[in-house]
Amino acid sequence: MAGKAVAVAHGAATIVNAIALGRGAAFGVDLWTKAEVKLTSEVGVFEVNITSDPSESTLLVEKTVTRVLQRFGLEKSFGAKVKTESNIPAARGLKSSSVAANATALATTAALGKTLDDLETVKIGVESAFDAKCTITGAFDDACASYFGGAVITDNTNRQILKQMPLPKDLAVLFHVPAKKAYTINSDVARLQTVKPLVETAFEKAMAGKLWEALTLNGLVYSAASNQNASIAIDALAAGAVAAGLCGKGPAVTAVTPTDNVDRVKAALQKYEGEVLLAHFNSEKAKVL
């Protein structure tokens, strides 16, 4: 048995947020999280170091390791030391939790010298997010987009992938990332569900392959429902983005733009306080390194 392994999973961005419907859509981006898992003989003891943001809770990582150990009946045999590093800002709607869970589940499985099929790995991460109380829908859409890359449309309630689509090559992704954190579990779900019919329309657009229309509509609707600033997305669209809207529950905003127009859209986003991250689409699966 190896006893130690490192895995990487990539980031994702919202097309349709699943909170209102229980169904959602997301696409993969080339931001990343690496998890290094080292098994120890200290049964049930988990030391977690989130190197990129030490103030973040380690509970999700601990729950993910625990679930993998339980899956193989080894929870009474091992503890673990886990180190994660990431270039994804936490608690801004940028899927940092789903990505960390995917990387941790893969690395723990590999450290045990075992393998699981892809969907089972994803589902372990989703269950762990419920265990850690850092999700409302389980974020199965985000987890699948992070794990498989490309665009993914899912039924989060039943953990089913409804559709997978490749992404075009000539587009880039910009994220406007405010300094302030916002945790999904604190979202006002009742209020967000009042916009369900409009989110349904966005979801239908996504299913029809109109991903960018879906992203923009979804973003505007959720921005209004959660009292967030829709002007950031509108300014990005005015600067030539093909799609722009709130990512997850925010506060980050995603703008998808032709690669030759990145500078104009970036300038529009930089008028607002916060940092602007440039990313590209990801179509690579999460993997053990």
Image (spheres, rainbow, N blue to C red):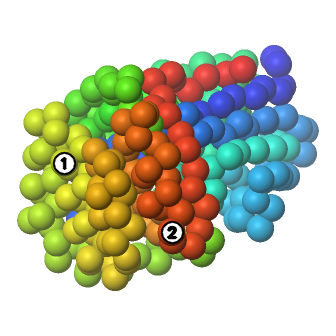
Which residue is depicted at the point 34% across and 64% down? 235
Circle 2: residue type: Lys
Rounded to the nearest angstrom, the CA distance separating label 1 from label 2 is 24 Å
Report the residue marked by disc 2: 271
Q: Nearer the viewer, residue 71 or 33?
A: 33
Q: Is residue 131 visible?
A: no
Q: Nearer the viewer, residue 240 or 177?
A: 240
Tell me, yes or no, whether the two marked residues, 1 and 2, touch with CB atoms within 8 Å.
no
Which residue is depicted at the point 61% across and 61% down? 275
Quarter that holds the N terminus = top right
In the rendering, at what x and y percent does residue 166 appear?
32, 23
Quarter that holds the C terminus = top right
In the rendering, at what x and y percent does residue 184 appear?
47, 68
In the rendering, at what x and y percent does residue 65 appear?
68, 43
Residue 261: quarter of image: top left
**Left or right: residue 224 compared with residue 2:** left
In the rendering, at what x and y percent does residue 29 appear?
49, 37
